[in-house]
Amino acid sequence: DVSDSGSPASKAAPMATPALQEGERAVVSGGKYDGQQGVVASVTAKSCTLLIDGKKTGNIPLEAVSRVGAAGAAAAVDVSDSGSSDSGAKVRALAIGASQDPSAEAKQKAVAADVDFREVRYVPRNLAATREGFPLPDVIDDVVTVKKWMEDSGPDVEVNRFVGRDDTNSLTRKAFLAKVDRLLAQPGELFILYYAGHGTDQSERLAAPGAFCMQKDGYVTLDDLINVWAGPQVTARRGQRFVIIADSCFSGALVERLKQIHLERKREGLPNLNVAVQSACGVRETSMGGVFTLPFVEKQMGKRASFDWKGAVPHKSVCTACRSYYKDGCPSCTKLHKAGFPRSVDEVQHPDYFTTWGADNVSAGGFRLRFYRRA
C-alpha cells in the first residue's frame, strides 16, 4: 500500500476487463442495436457478432459491446424493487399447483418438500371426482418434481412454490397474479412459471381457451401474464426471457395465442416479448393422469424418459360396455370421448411449444431448459 493523503495519482489503475468469449451474453451501446442484448456468436481482435432474437448481427466494434453484468452494462435487466430478492440468482422460478385434493398424503408431501400448503379436512381419493370443482389428486407431485429438478440444477436457480387447495379459495386470480408479479419484479435473466391445474376449453365463454382456472374468482389468461411481464415497459425486458410451462387441459391454446400475439407485434414493429409457452397437450386435448411433468423433467436431466400416453387413462382404457378401448357406434364410448377421453393412444396429449426468439431451448448461467413437441 503506497497510498498517500488521497491525491489522484495514488489511485490504483482499474483492472482490465477480460475479453469477450463466445457463448457469453452481451449488450450493445449505440448504433443499430443500441440497448439490445444477445449471445456472442464470434469474436475477432476488433469486432464481434451477436445472436439477437435468433438472428445473427453484422460485425459490431468491440468498444460498443459490454458483457452483461459488467460495470454500467445492461441496467435494464435489473427490474427489482424494494421487495426483490438479493440472492443473485440468474433463473427465477415459480411452481404453482391449483385445485389440489386436500388429502393427508398431499399434506405429508408438501411438508417434506417445503411447499406452501395448509391442512384441511381429508377427502378420500375415490370420492374426489364427485366433489364440486373437480379436485386434482396429484398436483402436489408435479410441483414437488419441478421444485426438486430446478433446485438440483445449481446455484443459479431460485424457485418458489405454492399449491392451492381445492375448495378453500387459497388461489384466487388476485393471489395468482400477485405471486407472478413478485416473481417478475426480481432481477434475473430467465423467469419460469410452472402451472399444474385446470384449464379452460373453448366452451367456457368467460375466459379464453387454455386459461388457468382459479379458485373463486375466475381465470388467468396468457394476455394477463404478458401484461404483468411486459406492461408498458417491454423494452426493459431486453436480455430477459419469460417461460410459461402449463400442465393443464387445453394448454395448447396458449401456444396458439402466443403465436398470434407475436405475429401481430411483428406486423406493428413492436419489440420482441421474449416469451415462450410449453404446453402439456394440444388445443382440444386434456392433460390427464400427470403423464407430462415427470417425463418432461427427466428429459431435462438427460434421461431417456418416455411419455406413457396410454397410461394417462388406465381407468378408462377399456369400455365396460363393449370391452374395447374405443368403438364407433358404442354409446358408452361416444359418451367417454365427448367427456375428453381419447379414441386411441394417438389422441392422447400432444405437447407443443412456441418461443418468440425462435429456438428450441433457453439457458441462463448453468441452467438450460429444452422445449418438447410431440408431432
Image: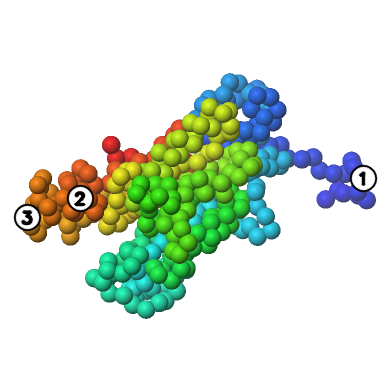
Place residue 114 in its image quadrant: bottom left
Where in the figure is residue 311, as x and y percent of width and height? 20, 54
* Quarter of the image that includes the C terminus: top left
Depth check, front residue: 319 or 309: 319
- Which of the two discs, 3 and 1, labels the residue nearer the N terminus? 1
User: Which kind of residue does numbered mark 2 sit on?
Assistant: His
Q: Is residue 329 visible?
A: yes
Q: Which one is closest to the eye, mark 3 or mark 1?
A: 3
Kindly identify which residue carries mark 2: 337
* Mark 1 or 2, nearer chain start: 1
Residue extending furthest left?
322
User: Which mark, by number, is residue 43?
Assistant: none
Type of residue at label 1?
A: Ser
Q: Quadrant of residue 265?
A: top right
Mark 1 vs mark 2, foreground winner is: 2
Q: Are marks 1 and 2 in contact (CB under 8 Å)?
A: no
Task: Report the side of 299 relative to 64 (left or right).
Answer: left
The residue that mark 3 highlights is 323
**192, above or below 132, in the image:** above
Does residue 366 appear anywhere in the picture? no
Alpha carbons under labels 1 and 2: distance apart: 83 Å
